[in-house]
Image: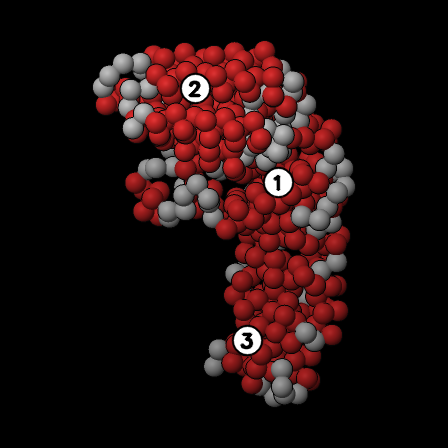
């Protein structure tokens, strides 16, 4: 008869006590003892409590093998919620003080919901010493705000280790996902927190996700065969990102700006890459991609100095690199968020960039969105002169496609539609100039279909986007232009 059956069925107090002591002394795997305790507790739960008490008291009397006694008593307590077992566990936890080896750490995670905070902190220290990220992730939910910083530091160190080993080709996707799971647990402290002390936790969690972001964007066949999560990442990754964005948006602009400076200090590649043409490993590129996606949500809280010195150089590196499509799209999304936040100083540069990218790298829709965002930012900033320069660049690009030919006609039509969209975006003092420029080119357009298409696009723009102050003048102008176009059928 094995020990488990004796402990679960014997009616002899002395036999149960002796078998308990012998089992604790001989068994080295703490998880096995914990599972044995749960089985015994389950079997004895509805019977006499005397034999269950014999098991618990034998564990309490143990002096040498404290880890084993705690594992067995802990299993009994988890299965039965027995008050005596709970008191014994608390006493053994105090005497054990978090040690016991790797298998015992797994037992600690099972007992964490019932442990007192000082004992949890002792287990955190042991898990940190043994670099056990999975245990740290499970314990993160039970530590207080003072201890979560320590857990975040340990998880971040593990993430940096994963990144360095990945660049040497010895890290695995499972390692990265284990770190992300731990980071997601730490990030839950940010969901409702506003304490300034959590700003450092925010920074560490953000950089942890950045260091492991290659696991979401990696295109290696080996990784795709393991898991295919795409840009959206795993559930843990999405949960942690949501907590990061929510926390940053609840803080003052000054605090968010300071946190962004902190992440740039943690990741030197964010400063190095914009000034270098060297292609680095996918791990570092993945970190930059993560930060571009994250910063897109907080640009409205950043100072112009931070945007120009840190954010825009990073975006500028990728805004013209079409070969890296994920990075290309994220860079453009980041610049658009910068423009939407009112940082009009980048608008003239961006208008030139998107015009140069058309039509080889971007289509009419993306050109229209990007160019209109640049002009609108300048209009809101009162920079009529710079807005006029941008419109002049677009008009010059339209005139480059003058002449006959199907492709030229199609490009001319698309660019005229982009120009037509500006009637709702340019400063009011430039409206008549834009209307006149459109009139001249529509009247000179040899293709009736193009003329008709541009007029329809202008009409849609006026109805959907133009502010009320512009609509009377624009409505009569569109009516006259449509009459001229229809008269030339």
Name the residue rendered at 59%, 35% in the picture: 297
Name the residue rendered at 57%, 17% in the picture: 430
Q: Is residue 451 visible?
A: yes
* Label ID, residue 245: 1
Foreground mark, 1 or 3?
1
Return the x and y of residue 222 as percentages of the image width and height.
31, 42
* Label ID, residue 439: 2
Say which quadrant the C terminus sits in: top left
202 left or right, relative to 289: right
Q: Residue furthest left?
A: 405
Picture colour scheme: secondary structure
What whole-number distance in Å separates the C-alpha atoms at marks 3 and 2? 85 Å
Q: 90 or 203: which is nearer to us?
A: 203
The image quarter in which residue 244 lies: top right
Q: Name above or below for residue 43 compared with residue 167.
A: below
Return the x and y of residue 305 as percentages of the image width and height.
66, 18
**Label 3's element?**
helix
The residue wearing badge 3 is 39
Q: 425 or 251: which is nearer to us?
A: 425
Name the residue rendered at 73%, 63% in the picture: 90
Q: Name above or below for residue 441 compared with residue 14.
A: above
143 left or right, relative to 279: right
Q: Residues within 10 Å of mark 2 (few under 14, many from 20)?
A: some
475 left or right, relative to 358: right
Q: Residues within 10 Å of mark 3 (few under 14, many from 20)?
A: many
Of label 3 and label 2, which has the lower sequence position? 3
Are the residues at dot 1 and dot 3 in contact (C-beta closer than 8 Å)?
no
Q: 228 or 442: which is nearer to us?
A: 442
Foreground mark, 3 or 2?
2
């Amino acid at each position: 008869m094995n020990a488990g059956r004796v402990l679960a069925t014997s009616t002899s107090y002395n036999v149960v006590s002796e078998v308990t002591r012998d089992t604790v002394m001989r068994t080295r795997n703490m998880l096995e003892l914990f599972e044995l305790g749960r089985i015994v507790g389950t079997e004895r739960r509805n019977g006499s409590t005397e034999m269950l008490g014999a098991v618990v008291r034998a564990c309490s009397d143990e002096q040498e093998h404290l880890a084993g006694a705690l594992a067995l008593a802990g299993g009994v307590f988890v299965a039965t919620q027995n008050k005596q077992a709970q008191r014994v566990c608390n006493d053994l936890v105090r005497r054990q003080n978090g040690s016991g080896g790797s298998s015992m750490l797994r037992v600690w995670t099972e007992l964490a919901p019932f442990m007192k905070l000082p004992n949890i902190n002792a287990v955190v220290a042991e898990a940190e010493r043994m670099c056990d990220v999975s245990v740290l992730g499970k314990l993160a939910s039970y530590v207080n705000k003072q201890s979560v910083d320590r857990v975040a530091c340990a998880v971040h160190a593990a993430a940096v280790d994963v990144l360095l080993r990945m660049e040497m080709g010895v890290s695995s996707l499972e390692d990265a996902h284990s770190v992300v799971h731990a980071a997601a647990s730490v990030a839950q402290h940010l969901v409702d927190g506003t304490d300034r002390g959590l700003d450092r936790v925010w920074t560490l969690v953000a950089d942890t996700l950045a260091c492991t972001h290659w696991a979401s964007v990696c295109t290696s066949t080996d990784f795709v065969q393991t898991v295919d999560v795409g840009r959206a990442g795993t559930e843990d990754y999405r949960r942690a990102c949501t907590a990061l964005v929510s926390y940053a948006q609840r803080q003052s602009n000054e605090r968010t700006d300071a946190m962004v400076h902190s992440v740039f200090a943690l990741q030197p590649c964010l400063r190095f890459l914009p000034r270098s043409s060297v292609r680095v490993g996918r791990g570092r590129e993945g970190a930059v991609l993560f930060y571009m996606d994250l910063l897109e949500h907080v640009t409205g809280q950043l100072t112009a100095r931070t945007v120009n010195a840190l954010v825009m150089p990073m975006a500028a590196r990728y805004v013209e690199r079409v070969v890296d499509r994920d990075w290309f799209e994220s860079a453009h999304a980041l610049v658009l968020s910068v423009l939407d936040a009112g940082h009009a100083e980048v608008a003239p540069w961006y208008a030139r960039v998107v015009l140069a990218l058309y039509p080889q790298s971007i289509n009419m829709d993306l050109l229209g969105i990007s160019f209109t965002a640049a002009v609108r930012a300048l209009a809101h900033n009162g920079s009529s002169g710079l807005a006029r320069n941008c419109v002049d660049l677009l008009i010059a690009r339209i005139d480059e496609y003058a002449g006959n030919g199907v492709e030229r006609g199609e490009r001319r039509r698309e660019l005229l539609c982009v120009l037509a969209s500006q009637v709702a975006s340019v400063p009011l003092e430039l409206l008549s100039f834009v209307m006149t420029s459109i009139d001249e080119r529509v009247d000179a357009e040899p293709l009736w279909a193009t003329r008709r298409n541009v007029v329809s696009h202008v009409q849609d723009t006026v109805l959907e986007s133009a502010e009320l102050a512009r609509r009377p003048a624009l409505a009569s102008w569109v009516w006259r232009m449509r009459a001229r176009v229809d008269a030339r059928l």
